[in-house]
Image (tube, coloured by chain):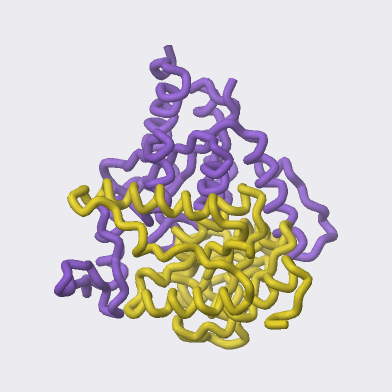
Chain colours: A purple, B yellow
Amino acid sequence: MLKVYLAGPEVFLPGGRELIERKRALSARYGFTPSPLHADLTPTASASPLARGIEISRLNEERMREADVCIANLTPFRGVSADPGTVYELGYMAAEGKPVFAYTNDPADYSARAATYFAGGLHRDDDGVLRGPDGQMIEDHGMADNLMLEGGILTRDGVFVRAAALLEWDDLSAFERCLADARRALTGRQPLD
Amino acid sequence: MLKVYLAGPEVFLPGGRELIERKRALSARYGFTPSPLHADLTPTASASPLARGIEISRLNEERMREADVCIANLTPFRGVSADPGTVYELGYMAAEGKPVFAYTNDPADYSARAATYFAGGLHRDDDGVLRGPDGQMIEDHGMADNLMLEGGILTRDGVFVRAAALLEWDDLSAFERCLADARRALTGRQPLD
């Protein structure tokens, strides 16, 4: 059975532990073995906060190396883009040559979220380039986030599932579609057959 | 000579091309061969925005595979965290087993920036965990951003340089310190000897 690494910022959410357990159970239903829980990896209690952070990073990288496939939750987190820890992990597993899949609970293009972030003050310059009020270029490729994320997924024949409407963090319908797509892509099997 | 991949969001900035040229020239001064410019990689003009985005991603990944070392600009970009494209690339090159270095022009801890983002509404719960007004956990490891970023750098004996005070995008003093540290770490040579 393929081992799946579930990258995402759920660990930060209230009730995150339960949400992660639901994602792990769903993964198993779709034929994947989920990586062990974050909380199973207890760093030394006596360590400093910095040393604990480094140790968690090291253990997460170990879990990634042991996994066969990545499913990343790229729902925007505290701003216009995905959680940076999740993005690091997506890039990490892509470089390992593993199939990478992702989903987001936000249906909007990156440029639409940037327009909200800049309170609508976007304009096109004389060359047709979309820019913010600070003159900075806004990516406008019809993608959900920075092109390295979606590009890294699509060049590896992965799938990036976008929810059809904005969903709460505990709504796992986009995640479940992503699991079904990953199962189909990797095993040739329909979901739950 | 070691080839350095300069990851960063400069391409989005007004005057970004000139800034990237300054970074490339500085890299050469410190003994590194900088990756070719983004603009050298011209995707097919007739392609759709989505196809162009995928092509740029593919070409950037090619440049990373050809490079020996990564220096990432993790200065916060449009929010509380670093540019996600840069973070993807940091994770990518870490997984390739290459030395990774980073710098930020913002001296603040992640938790301090989160406090600004949430307009100060942070609190510690009964377990001592720092939380936002939405109840979400705020990382509090004394790091500049999510622990996967700084952890990935430090577990590989890289260096993460933080500016001593908030600097403009075109201030390259933190970048230059990072170059000097990378040169010392990788060649055993002092800067510019």
Locate residue B91 relative to residue B8 in the image: left or right: right
Locate residue B120 relative to residue B143 in the image: left or right: left
Task: Give the farthest residue toward the top.
Answer: A193
Q: At 63% from the left edge and 63% from the top edge, which residue is drawn?
A: B2
The image shows residue B100, relative to residue B29, as above or below, that is: above
Q: Looking at the image, which is closer to me, A154 or B108?
A: A154
Q: Looking at the image, which is closer to me, A12 or B26?
A: B26
Picture coordinates of residue A34, whole percent (x, y): 59, 31
Q: Does residue A90 appear in the picture of this structure? A: yes
Tell me where residue A190 sits by quadrant: top left
Locate residue A59 relative to residue A145 in the image: left or right: right
Q: Does residue A108 appear in the picture of this structure? A: no
Picture coordinates of residue A91, whole percent (x, y): 52, 49
* Quadrant (top left/top right/bottom left/bottom right) for the C terminus of chain A: top left
Locate residue A59 relative to residue A141 in the image: left or right: right
Q: At 67% from the left edge and 77% from the top edge, which residue is drawn?
A: B180
Picture coordinates of residue B99, whole percent (x, y): 67, 59
